[in-house]
Amino acid sequence: MNRIALFFVTVIISSVAYGKTAKSTVILLSIDGFSYDYLSQYQPKNILDFATKGIKAKLIPVYPSKTFPNHLSIITGVYPAKHGIVHNKFYHPDLGQTYKLGAGKHNSSWLTAQPFWFYAQQQGVKSAIYFWPESEAKGQGSEPSYHIPYNNVDSIEMRFNQIITWLKKPTEQAPKLILSYFSSVDSAGHEYGLNSPELSAAITQIDHAFGRFINRLEKEVTQKVNVILLSDHGMVQLNQQRKINLNTVFNKKIQESIDNKRIVVAKSSTQLYLYFDHTKLTKQQQSNFTNELKITQKQNTKWYEVYRKGNYPKHWHLNKTNVLVIPDIIINAKPTASFTYGNYAHNGKATHGYDALQHSGLMSIFLAAGPDIVKGRAVIPFENIHIVPFMSQLLGITPPENIDGKVDVLNSVLRY
């Protein structure tokens, strides 16, 4: 086949793959901390009704099962090692700083992958965001057409009302990609636990608001709309008797190196990320520290695990030794246990961040329905990196190159 003929074949294939759904709008909604188990435990009526109109699946969080790494993987289609946000809290040796939530707003170099709305805007698809982790990062190229920065005041109803308002704009002004994020279920789960009336109330609140939103979509919006409702991770009930004091993890020699800044530790309740100062510690010293940590770990095998960079579990996707923000050592708490240090102890009843494959309660939800999505198709559990190519198909645009997500994972649930 000559090059000209090949070009036209490529165009035809692209038209088949993307062109038939080019006029559809995609709404991506994330309920932070909504475990897949909540669907059966709390039976949210409107969410379950929505699931019957399209597809439902368990969504597998990337490691660690924290909010920011997962929301960035959802919207970039790559694992944390590629998008740069490897935890809610981690250290960057070159910047000499520890990442704090939303730090990209002040320095976009924390982020090393483009968000999906960048590619959508580049291909003429207007986007709108009403809260999304790190959506305020600047200097990455195309910004969304409409953007409301995060605050802790705007209600759930305000967000849904604004989405309806955006959809009612004239055709040439209306966004075709809309994102929004809700944190109330995560907050209630953390503070009150998995079987609490407060968590039940938070789920009921978002369920009722979502039901009203879907009803308004059907009655007030004329264009084709595909809705994706998902979460970033689930939640695990903490065992208050399984608190891990750092004195039992670090011996005196290691603690001295931490105090002298030869080792930097980024701490959370579920992981300790250790970064060696390679200018101050020899390879032999680094190896000795690793061995000492593993010796101590053998006395606490039910509580946590110790891994060295280059030998992390394959499904963590953190074995890129040239990525500076990936720690030299990860000390990973086992589900229901948590780290305490200084004046810090996780005072809530539940948390997340553990390896999602170690506890089923960490599985998140993926529900999708609309005119371009089949109804009732069984979908096996899949990782959230595959959502970007799925949205690309729904929007009728070319998916980003060099991402980890694959088109064929959800291709079977599309109407062609």
Image (cartoon, helix red, strand yellow):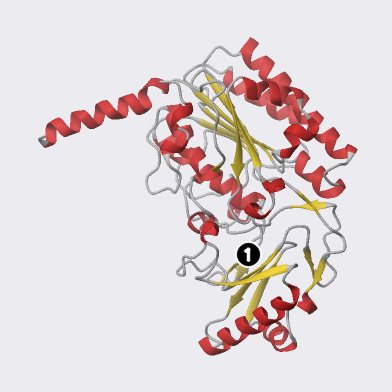
Q: Is residue 117 left or right of residue 67?
A: left
Measured as percent of width and height from the top left, residue 22 is found at 41, 23
Image quadrant holding the C terminus, namely top left
Do we see residue 134 in this rendering? no
Secondary structure beneath dot 1 equals: loop
Q: What residue is rendered at 46% in x and 20% in y?
A: 172
- Front in this rendered view, residue 274 or 312: 312
Residue sitting at x 54%, y 48%: 73
Q: Quadrant of residue 168?
A: top right
How many numbered tags mark residues here? Answer: 1
User: Residue at horizontal 71%, vertical 87%?
Assistant: 256
Q: Position of residue 110 (x, y in %)?
A: 54, 59
Q: Residue furthest left?
A: 2
* 290 left or right, relative to 195: left
Q: Position of residue 211 (x, y in %)?
A: 72, 21
Q: Residues within 10 Å of mark 1 (few under 14, many from 20)?
A: many
Instruction: Please determine whether, in this image, residue 204 is positioned above or below residue 322.
Output: above
- Looking at the image, is 388 positioned above or below residue 290? above
* Residue 342: quarter of image: bottom right
Location of residue 32 by image quarter: top right
Q: Amino acid at mark 1?
A: Phe
Please identify the quadrant where the N terminus is shown: top left
Residue 101 percent coordinates (x, y) = 67, 55
Disc 1 marks which residue?
A: 90
